[in-house]
Image: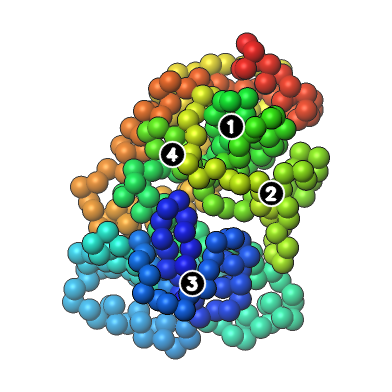
Amino acid sequence: MASLKLQSVNIKIDTNNAAYSRYLKTCFANFTEQDNVSFEYNLKLEVLWEDSGWKKYLKGVKTNKNFSVLGANTFLSDNRFLTVKKIGKSRKIIFDFKNESGQGVLRTIIRKKEFKDFFRYKILKKSQEEWFFSLTYPALYYPLFWHLERSRGMGVLHASGFSAENKGFIICGLEGIGKTSLALSFLESKDAIFLSDNLLFYDKEKIYPCYEPVRIHRNEKESLWQKNFEKINGLNILKGFYRPKFEVSNDGIAVDFLIFPEFSQDFCVKEISSFEAVNRALFLSYIPAELSNYSEYRNLYNLLEPEYNSLKFQQTALLELLRPVKCFRVGMPKADGIKKNFSRLKESILNG
């Protein structure tokens, strides 16, 4: 049994897989093993590997008269849903979520394949952490996202967030467009505060960090990050994983600028309305796998509260946040490199 606190949400975690427990401990600095299992929690997450018990568990749900069948291997009762999903090519997983008095309990049951896992990870030396990384989204992040939305009024964006020059920034765009490079360039400024690299939370007033390791491509320019981040050792994953050397702000920051970087023939800056910015930010955020997959799971969570309109909440909260914010689409010639494009961007929006 272990505890984890993310964005003031107390999470109880139980897993019977020692390797997965080590993975979580490596990724989350405040992942703490607990002897006392009676501590107060908002979310309880069980991540269990089972062999014959997997089929028995699913059969028990199929024969339970309290469940209605929504489709193939998807079941719903008044305060509980269960579904079977695949992560990877063939690994079937049961997700069994129950909502009781504001406390969410998600039981994730992975079908154990001892021979295949031994061959894959011991003989072929494939990375088990890559699969753990994919598993952690539906097993930990997605129930956290939903809990924060329903209990704290917080949404999530695929974006980088930070403050620099006494201004708060969001950089929103797809992977590979330069969000991380631009954010790291701004961190060279005095008194800069880092929030998040890949995902961030927002409410009607501020943005807040989503506690993921910072993921930096191996071909990323080293000078942009080596002074501010340290590598997380022990993870065999395609991207280098890093954590900030400085304290990440937990209190959130107000936003002054929202930037949508794009590659273009010529450098250009176009200011857009907050209404356009809301739609663009949400559309772009739910294209990458992290949040496009979440939208499917969130719809299952929302079946437990069918009168709740999740899309309306996102649009309303984000529009309120962005009303006083200057929002820009920024075209950058890729051939000019990050240093030159960053210099022109900074000059255009801070001094323009």
Q: Nearer the viewer, residue 296 or 40?
A: 40
Picture disc at residue 163: 1
Q: Is residue 210 visible?
A: yes
Spatial separation of the CA atoms under disc 4 and disc 2: 24 Å
Q: Is residue 262 above or below residue 21?
A: above
Whichever of labels 1 and 3 marks the residue nearer the N terminus, that label is 3
Q: Secondary structure at mark 2?
A: loop
Label 3 amino acid? Answer: Ala
Tag 4 residue: 202
Label 1 amino acid? Answer: Ser
Spatial separation of the CA atoms under disc 1 and disc 3: 33 Å
Spatial separation of the CA atoms under disc 2 and disc 3: 25 Å
Frontmost of labels 4 and 2 is 2
Q: Is residue 234 above or below residue 18?
A: above
Tag 3 residue: 2
Q: Is residue 59 above or below residue 168?
A: below
Tag 2 residue: 245
Q: Secondary structure at mark 1?
A: strand
Q: Position of residue 336 (x, y in %)?
A: 79, 25
Callout 2: few (<14), some (14-19), or many (20+) C-alpha neighbours within 10 Å?
A: few
Q: Secondary structure at mark 3?
A: strand
**Which residue is rendered at x = 62% and y = 86% of the image?**
115
Write down the quadrant of residue 189 in the picture: top right
